[in-house]
Image (tube, rainbow, N blue to C red):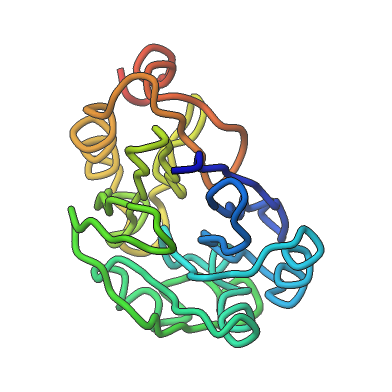
Amino acid sequence: MANLKIGKITLGSCATNCYFVYREGETEVLFFDPADQGEYLYQALQQKGFQVGAILLTHGHFDHIWGAQKLRALSSSKIYAYKEEEALLSDANLNISEMAGRACTLKPNVYLEDGQEIELLGMKIKVIATPGHTEGSCCYYFEEAGMLVSGDTLFQESVGRTDFPTGSFSKLIRSIKERLFVLPDEVKVYPGHGEATTIAYEKMHNPFCG
């Protein structure tokens, strides 16, 4: 099968990374965390020759979901999220969108289980629950390509903040050490903010996870 490719669009008030994953030569993509401006994202992908086949959320904070409703409507695709994030997605205070000045709630089409392996658009993804940044934070692992979409759990030489509702620093560090650092060293990590990194680099250089 053709190789998996990953693209990135960064936008919104928090410079959130939106990723799209696809097979080389294919036009349908898996879209992760529509940060804002769903119509802009839809049109930007169309200009690149892509169509959204499914939308996946790493967690429910406003800066990762503001564009989701519009993108779902325009693309007629389903939204997937980890089941433990249901409460946060449905509460504008918990997901900080009320405080950010644009209240937003969201009801995904499909709730996922920890450890569940799903196949979408011919791509296999493993759901890895990583509570800490929020109670329902998760990462998506493409074993075939050695890629991890990590949301706001793990950053290059940093970790997600835990001072918002449902956050827990101790849970976050446990999630990283027990759920992510057990992945192969060469796995490339694509975080919700900032630049990509690898599991090996973070094990060696992340000051929060020593």
The residue located at (18%, 53%) in the rendering is: 115
- Residue 179 falls left or right of residue 50: left
The residue located at (50%, 42%) in the rendering is: 2
Q: Position of residue 168 (x, y in %)?
A: 28, 49
- Asked where in the image residue 95 lies, by quadrant, the reply is bottom left
- Residue 129 falls left or right of residue 63: left
| Image quadrant where one finds the C terminus | top left
Outermost residue, right direction?
Answer: 47
- Residue 116 vs 174, above or below: the answer is below
- Residue 197 vs 79, above or below: the answer is above
- Residue 119 falls left or right of residue 61: left
- Asked where in the image residue 57 lies, by quadrant, the reply is bottom left
State the residue in front, 111 or 132: 111
Q: Position of residue 148 (x, y in %)?
A: 41, 40
| Image quadrant where one finds the N terminus | top left
The residue located at (37%, 25%) in the rendering is: 208
- Residue 136 vs 175, above or below: the answer is below
Q: Position of residue 151 (x, y in %)?
A: 46, 49
- Residue 46 vs 175, above or below: the answer is below
The residue located at (39%, 80%) in the rendering is: 108
**Numbered disc total:** 0
- Asked where in the image residue 11 lies, by quadrant, the reply is bottom right
State the residue in front, 205 or 83: 83
State the residue in front, 49 or 175: 49
Outermost residue, front direction?
Answer: 1
Q: Position of residue 96 (x, y in %)?
A: 51, 70
